[in-house]
Image: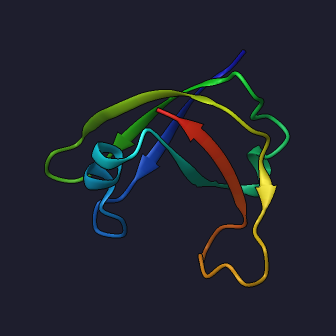
Amino acid sequence: MKYWAFHCNPKAWDSIKEISEHVDGTWLINKQDEKDIQIGDKFALWISGKDAGVYAFGEITDSPKMLKEDEKITNANILLNLLA
């Protein structure tokens, strides 16, 4: 089992609102981490900015998946399911 720290920029995504409304979700990762992240690994969700800190801990619940062509997320291409 590995432990991961996922970074969130609050200027790009209202992460505090999202994690307060949902217990699971999808996260973007770099392709280079695709083979290292496994189901059952643990993570910390770190939010940067003026109120920086770790806002959630959770577990990887699915293997990374490539984005579908019709999904409009930029600057990344791997999806990861999380349970916070």
At 34% from the left and 53% from the top, the residue drawn is: 18
Q: Is residue 55 left or right of residue 25?
A: left
Image spot of residue 23 (x, y percent): 43, 38
Q: How many marks?
A: 0
Q: Residue furthest left?
A: 50
At 53% from the left and 48% from the top, the residue drawn is: 25
In this picture, is 21 found above or below 67?
above
Q: Is residue 24 left or right of residue 11?
A: right
Q: Is residue 18 left or right of residue 39?
A: left
Image spot of residue 15 (x, y percent): 33, 54
In the picture, the quarter occupied by the N terminus is top right
At 79% from the left and 41% from the top, the residue drawn is: 63
**Image quarter for residue 39?**
top right
Image spot of residue 17 (x, y percent): 26, 54
The type of colouring in the image is rainbow
Image spot of residue 32 (x, y percent): 78, 50
Q: Residue furthest top?
A: 1
In this picture, is 7 found above or below 68?
above
Q: Between residue 21 and residue 3, name the one nearer to us.
A: 21
At 58% from the left and 52% from the top, the residue drawn is: 26
